[in-house]
Amino acid sequence: MDPFLFFFALAIFIAALHLYRERQELSRIRAYEILLVWLLVFAIGFNDILAGLAHIFMGPEIAAQIGWPPGSPFQYEVGCANLALGVVGVLCYRFRDHFWLGTILACLVFGWGAGIGHVRDILVNATFAPYNAGPILLYDFGVPLLLVALWLLQGREIARMGMQGPAN
């Protein structure tokens, strides 16, 4: 199974268990918060830590799965960017509010930038390697969009209720 799909499914599974556990006193605000935290921790955090380590320590193998030539120094840089995003994703378990927003925006910028690069490579070079044209596109475009949507829905619900957001 693709690591991204595994961590995304794990995030949804843990969120579902958490939502079930709190079902009696669950508000929409809390439901959005639960979905966000587990997506940030697993679909971004642990997934990007693994991706970063793979780019850094298994460069030639990962390059082949993306359709890149091995040995590019940019792969190390992408690995460090993935690693940084993964660390802040995991830290979202402890830190909330604007820390989450910063993590979501970093995910959006990095993900959409990388996704555009993958799509360009598909269109220009017909590179349909698994990590260039597979679930990576869902990760690059879909996950940031889902995180932004959940953040906005939570904010709208907080505003509707006339409440303050969670404190850091």
Image (tube, rainbow, N blue to C red):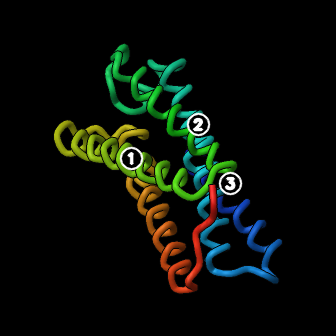
Tell me where residue 70 appears, x and y as whole percent. Answer: 37, 17
User: What residue is pinned by disc 3?
Assistant: 10
Which residue, as the protein is rendered here, is positioned at the far top?
A: 71
Q: Amino acid at mark 2?
A: Val
Q: Secondary structure at mark 2?
A: helix
Residue closer to the observer: 44 or 160: 160
Label 2 with label 3: CB-CB less than 8 Å: no
Drawn side of residue 89 relative to residue 128, left or right: right
User: What residue is pinned by disc 1?
Assistant: 111
Q: Secondary structure at mark 1?
A: helix
Label 2 with label 1: CB-CB less than 8 Å: no
Looking at marks 2 and 3 on the same chain, the residue that comes earlier in the sequence is marked by 3
Residue 3 makes an appearance in the image = no
Drawn side of residue 122 relative to residue 145, left or right: left
Q: Is residue 151 above or below residue 163?
A: above
Q: Amino acid at mark 3?
A: Leu
Between circles 2 and 1, the one closer to the viewer is: 2
Q: Is residue 146 above or below residue 108?
A: below
Quadrant where the N terminus lies? Answer: top right
- Distance in Å between CA atoms under marks 2 and 1: 16 Å
Between circles 3 and 1, the one closer to the viewer is: 1
Residue closer to the observer: 135 or 158: 158
| x 39%, y 33%: residue | 66
